[in-house]
Amino acid sequence: MAGRQSQHQFFNFLQHAERTGKSFTRDTLIGASGWKASTFATYYIKGQITQFVTETTDGAFQAINTLDLSFVEFQKRLSQSKHFQELGHKCKSQLAKALLKKARDNMMLALELYNRPSLENKLDGFVLLFCTAWEQLAKARLIERDGEDSIFEAANKKGIRHTVSLRVCLARLYNEKDLVRRNIEIVTDWRDQAVHLLMPELQAIASRIFQSGVLNFSSEFESFAQVPFLAVQHTGMMTIVGDFKLPAMSMLKTQYGSAAQEILELAADIQREVEQADDMAFAIPLKVHLVFAHGEGDAQVVLTKATGTANDLSDLRQRLTVIEKPVDLDKSHPHSLKKLQLLVNNQLIDERDVQKLEKCIPGRSKKTGKPELNTHCIQASIARLGWRNSNNTYHHHAKFADRHQYSDGAVSELVRRITQEDDFVAKAKKMMSKKKHS
């Protein structure tokens, strides 16, 4: 949009539309904003102006969130919109958008409650917030798929409509054997039938189910909202508790009286379900980590399966598998694929003349016409080098976050290989093309 006057006209248009409650067409909105049709489409699809404009179910548009803004604040938000993506920007229903935000807030509250060290018994509060968050996310999804009426039951004699239960929502979204659904259902069972039995002694085994539930929520949330539930640096907010051991029955009876037997039975049921499922979607697998090292920098080892007892050190070593030390991706492999592409292009331009680059790089920049690697070139080169077949010096795949990251060494190595062999990229693209069509 060119000029302050045009922005003011756009602001006045939106405020008038919101104040009067009148809807408007896409063409009217484009005319009022002063953007080209393609520019508006880009901004709207990416959710960069959905803080002010929302699409109704019949394809018309309505203005929102402008009446309490000054023009200066409106300008500020609009200028920042290219760096902003509103949560729920894909939702056509305002109710679905509101439920999505509440779902995120409630799961965040559940995590903050669980990780508060001053609380001894965190289970009952976590269970309530966990179930609420899942119910709100499920209803937002159903509204967008089936309409707002889909989450309501028929009105009662007093004309009051209640929303459907979490279990009904799950049945509409997942098949009966889905472990994501089963994970939510078991926590829902605790909320409805056993919250009085969720004592601190059950935290170790329950936390494995909770953590899988949070990881499932993060995945489902991002898939639906197209916005991450948590920033990457916060994905480790829940920690797996150690080995699961209940106190003796006599101690439980002293603390909980006649409920001790019920607590033991609940613990046994949970343990049995976890072992039967044996799947991360239902409960986090628990491995025992031992360290055979002289210092912190040495390797870790994992006892993969403990059957019986080790008679000597030799017997123990036979049942150990060496694994890598945990990796801090932000330090060792800080670059996404897009950032890797940018850094490689910049280094090639800085260190090589145009004639050399024209030999090495088959693609050209649409803006400058100069040689430039596109995403396909980078992906093909990585595939040819086989980096993504494993975690290594150049590449690391974080399984929980499902993201591929690359090191500074990957930048240098790609620049070296591309300039050392003039047709390296061209051959890589041919190899990738053959694999796709084979």
Image: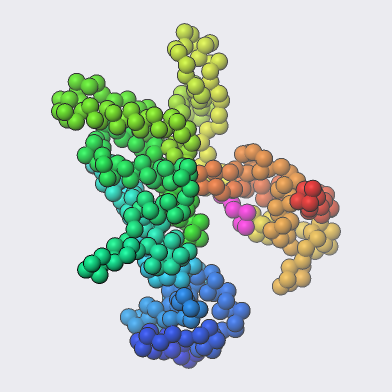
The location of residue 99, given as percent across then percent down, is: 37, 63
From what the image shows, is residue 292 above or below residue 117? above
When the figure is inspected, residue 225 is found, relative to residue 21, above or below; the finding is: above
Q: Nearer the viewer, residue 315 or 5?
A: 315
From the top left corner, tell me how far across and down residue 106 is, in percent.
Answer: 33, 55
Q: Left of 164 or right of it: where is 419? A: right
Which image quarter is the N terminus in? Answer: bottom right
Question: The magenta stretch spans which residues?
Answer: 334-339
The answer, for residue 235, to whether it is visible in the render is no
Residue located at (31% from left, 42% from top): 189
Q: Residue 370 magenta-drawn?
A: no
In the rendered picture of this protein, how many numbered marks are placed on residues?
0
Which of 109/146 is in front?
A: 146
Report the colour scheme: rainbow
Give x and y (percent) for residue 124: 26, 43
Q: Residue at x 46, y 65 (%)?
A: 146
Regarding residue 119, the answer to whether it shows in the image is: yes
Relative image position of residue 112 (x, y in whole percent): 32, 49
Pick the residue in front: 309 or 330: 309
Q: Relative to residue 78, is residue 338 depicted above or below?
A: above
The residue most toward the top is 311
Q: Residue at x 34, y 58 (%)?
A: 164
Residue located 39% across and 78% down the image:
64
Image-based side of 266 in relation to 79, left or right: left
Instruction: Place residue 119 in its image quadrant.
Output: top left
Q: Above or below — where is 255 with respect to 39?
A: above
